[in-house]
Image (cartoon, rainbow, N blue to C red):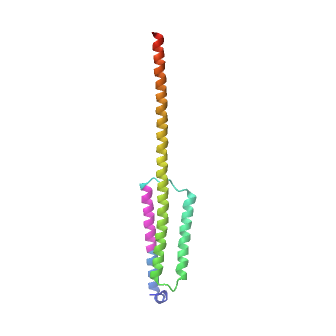
């Protein structure tokens, strides 16, 4: 059915708009749950407040654009609008997932670099211990020679 046909029945229009809003809300909740799960599985460094505010503002702007798009497409069927909302929600999900994956990769890289640094420190300490042990052995040897 077209929007014009649906507008003849305001209850259908309201129900359809409500269904679309509920589906978008459900998708947003799933994205939020996925984000929370990823944060718990990998100890991702926290995104600073400015970035969070920007992400929220971007999401709000994106939803505003969706609302404007819905208003402009009065001739489009509700199926087309519903598909567009779903596609936009999928794109938001993929964008957030990509950011989480990038943060996780950076975190893993930082951990690996810290491991390398610790290995280098351990090797240097072992070398210093060996040098000191050699010096102590040489001093003992000299002390024994001087006693004899």
Q: Nearer the viewer, residue 77 or 142?
A: 142
Q: Nearer the viewer, residue 115 or 135?
A: 135
x and y percentages locating residue 59 in the rendered image? 53, 68
Determine whether, in the image, residue 31 is placed left or right of residue 47.
left
Instruction: Give, as a single range, the part of the protein colored magenta.
Output: 23-40
Residue furthest to the top in view is 148
**In magenta stretch: residue 35:** yes
Number of numbered discs:
0
Q: Residue at x 46, y 25 (%)?
A: 133
Task: Examine the rendering and report whether any part of residue 82 can be seen.
Answer: yes
Quadrant including the N terminus? bottom left
Q: Residue at x 55, y 82 (%)?
A: 72
Residue 20 vertical placement versus 2 (above, below)? above
Residue 121 vertical placement versus 42 (above, below)? above
Residue 67 vertical placement versus 130 (above, below)? below
x and y percentages locating residue 135 in the rendered image? 49, 23
Q: Nearer the viewer, residue 103 or 117?
A: 117
Q: Residue at x 50, y 61 (%)?
A: 99
x and y percentages locating residue 108 in the rendered image? 46, 51
**In magenta stretch: residue 43:** no
Q: Does the magenta stretch mainly form a helix, a strand or a loop?
A: helix
Quadrant including the C terminus? top left
Q: Residue at x 48, y 51 (%)?
A: 109
Task: Examine the rendering and report whether any part of residue 14 can be seen.
Answer: no
């Amino acid at each position: 059915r077209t929007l014009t046909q649906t507008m003849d029945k305001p209850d259908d229009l309201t129900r359809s708009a409500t269904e679309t809003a509920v589906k978008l809300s459900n998708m947003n909740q799933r994205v939020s749950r996925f984000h929370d799960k990823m944060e718990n599985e990998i100890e991702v460094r926290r995104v600073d407040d400015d970035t969070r505010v920007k992400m929220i503002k971007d999401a709000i702007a994106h939803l505003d654009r969706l609302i404007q798009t819905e208003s402009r497409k009065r001739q489009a069927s509700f199926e087309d609008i519903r598909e567009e909302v779903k596609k936009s929600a999928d794109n938001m999900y993929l964008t957030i997932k990509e950011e989480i994956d990038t943060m996780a990769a950076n975190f893993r890289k930082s951990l690996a670099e810290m491991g390398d640094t610790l290995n280098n420190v351990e090797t240097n300490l072992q070398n210093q211990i060996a040098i000191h042990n050699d010096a102590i052995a040489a001093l003992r040897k000299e002390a024994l020679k001087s006693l004899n």
